[in-house]
Structure formats: structure tokens, C-alpha cells
Image: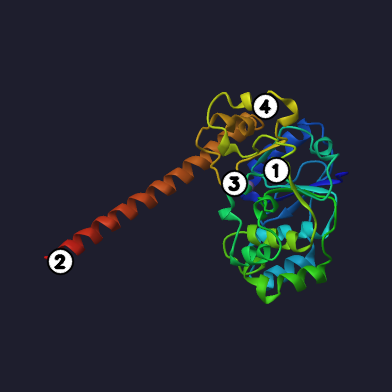
Amino acid sequence: MHLEKIVTLANQNTRLRFIAMERSLRATGCNLPLWVIPYDEKKFDLPVNAHWWELENVLHWLEVHHAHRMMRKYQCLLESNYQFVDSDVIFLKNPERELTSFSGFITSCGHWHNPEHVITKEVLTFFDKSTTTWQQKIFNAGQFACDKRLYNFDELKQIAEQPEYKASCISFRFHDQPGLNLLVNLSGISVTNITLQPYCMESTWAGDYTDEDYSRFWKNESKKPYIIHWAGCSMSTNRPIDKLFLGYLTKQEREEWNKKLAVITATRNTFQSKLKTRLRKMKAAVKLAVR
Ligand SMILES: [Mn+2]
């Protein structure tokens, strides 16, 4: 695969993560253009060699269907030779070099042993027709690369709107994972997960690295992951591996990050204490009722 661009999805809320991701990419020596799909209208100033990427027809179509904004990533399916990463990713190695010998659709996540966040009834029905080892063909929608254009806009629209796929590809309320997995696998492209045999790359998921000595898994350079993804795992719990992300922020940006975390923690605490009060009141009411 000859990568031509790195694609991501971001808005003002994820700006600090984006900044760290972009700096980590450049630190690996990768100078490919960075195409940024806006999550919504909250854009921000992008660094050199990065630009906002909006395909009006795709975005309008998704808007009409009130689709989840993460589905804006479907834009990638109309392109070739890219690596997509969420903004909660840090590059450890140059993706251009790492993917040179691969072709088709490449993933490096661990959903093969943890598939529940990817599948829906429609996804399982689809795989049921073709394979019993579908786990190796599913992927995390926050980290994938592909050298082929899988659809043109009309084909994408037509397939996503088919009654047997629409619930996953357009109407799914929570995220883009089942939809993207269906669309990619429906295209017939071969999906390779490089954490599986014969490549056996170590995990790309931050949640798999729980202590200070996380780099012990990376002694063999050829098995070292080229990205680390915080996928669904908080970047704010002071895991030792969070240093990889925080290390790319300036002192001022780190202060901004800490302030944001303080707001999130305070909101969570208020919510929890309100919930506790409500539960206490309900318990008391039940006690009174059963007397
Ligand atoms: Mn993510």
C-alpha cells in the first residue's frame, strides 16, 4: 500500500487530542497531508499540511437521514490509499513505512477478541452467509487503512439504504462501527488484521497497557504497534501510557487539558450525587408504600 494521506475526524472539542495526534505523526517523519473531516460546524485553525475535508453530497445525505455524525467517516470509502485515525490516537511509527508491504483493507485493533461493540443483528446476518470466523474481519472504526476506493457516492447511498442494512448503516444511534464494518465487508475487499497471525503485532489499544513498564511488550521492534488508540478508554485516569499523549502538549495546552478534565469530573460528580439523592428518595418512598 502506498499511502497518500492521513484522514481524521475532529472538532473544537477534540482539538487538544488532534494536536497531539498530528505532532506524533510528524515526529515519526510522516509528512503526508492530513485530511480532517469536521465532526460538526465547530472547526478550528489547522496546522500546516492539514485541511478540512467535506464531501457535500455525503454530508448532506447523512444530515437528511439524521445519521450519527461519526458516520461522516464514510467519506473515506470514496477514497483510496489512506490511513484513517481518530483524534485519540498517537503514532509510534511512520504509517507509510509500516503499511508498505500490505494491500487491501488493514486494521490493527483487538475487536477480534472483543467483538460486542462492533456487531448488530444485521452484521451477524451478513457474516452468517459467508464465514464462521467473522471475528477476524471486523475492525475498530477509529483506525483503519485502505488502498482501494470501495464505492462511488451513488453505490454507497444505495447499499446503505437497503432495508437489510439501513438500521446499522444509517439509523444506528450510538456510533459508526456496525455501519462501517458492514459497508467495508459488503464491498468484498479482503480485511487483514495485523495483530493476528502471521504478523502478530502487539496491541494498539491503550487499555491493554496498565502499568509503568508498558514498553516491555515492544522490545521486538517488528512487533511494536505503529499506533496507540485510547478507543473507549479514558485519557484522564493517569495511566502511565497517557504520557505518550500528554508528552506532545505544551505546558499551556496541558493546563487547558487539566482544566477541561476538572470540568468533566465536577459535572460527573454532580450527576452522581443527584442520582444518589434521587435513589435515596425512591427507596424511602418504596419503604413507606410497603408499610
Ligand atoms: Mn477513538
Q: Residue 174: percent from the left, percent from the top?
A: 57, 61
Q: Which labelled disc corresponds to residue 290? A: 2
Secondary structure of the residue carrying numbered label 1: loop
Please say whether residue 219 is visible from this viewpoint. Answer: yes
Q: Which residue is mark 3?
A: 113
For marks 4 and 3 on the same chain, the one whose residue lies earlier in the sequence? 3
Q: Residue at x 28, y 57 (%)?
A: 279
Q: How many neighbours does mark 3 have within 10 angstroms: few (below 14), some (14-19), or many (20 or more)?
A: few
CB contact under 8 Å: marks 4 and 3: no
Please say whether residue 256 is visible from this viewpoint. Answer: no
Mark 1 beta carbon near ligand 1 (under 8 Å): no
Q: Amino acid at mark 4?
A: Trp
Q: Residue at x 20, y 63 (%)?
A: 285
**Structural distance between the alpha carbons of marks 3 and 1:** 12 Å
Q: Residue at x 56, y 34 (%)?
A: 255
Q: Which residue is mark 1?
A: 108
Q: Which numbered disc, 3 or 1, marks the residue closer to the eye?
A: 3
Secondary structure of the residue carrying numbered label 3: helix
Which quadrant is the C terminus positioned in? bottom left
Q: Amino acid at mark 3?
A: His
For marks 2 and 1 on the same chain, the one whose residue lies earlier in the sequence? 1
Q: Amino acid at mark 1?
A: Ser
**Structural distance between the alpha carbons of marks 1 and 4:** 15 Å
Q: Residue 268: percent from the left, percent from the top?
A: 42, 48
Q: Amino acid at mark 2?
A: Val
**Structural distance between the alpha carbons of marks 2 and 4:** 60 Å
**Structural distance between the alpha carbons of marks 2 and 1:** 55 Å
Q: Which numbered disc, 2 or 1, marks the residue closer to the eye?
A: 1
Q: Which numbered disc, 2 or 4, marks the residue closer to the eye?
A: 4
Q: Which numbered disc, 3 or 2, marks the residue closer to the eye?
A: 3
Q: Residue at x 25, y 55 (%)?
A: 280
Q: Which residue is mark 4?
A: 218
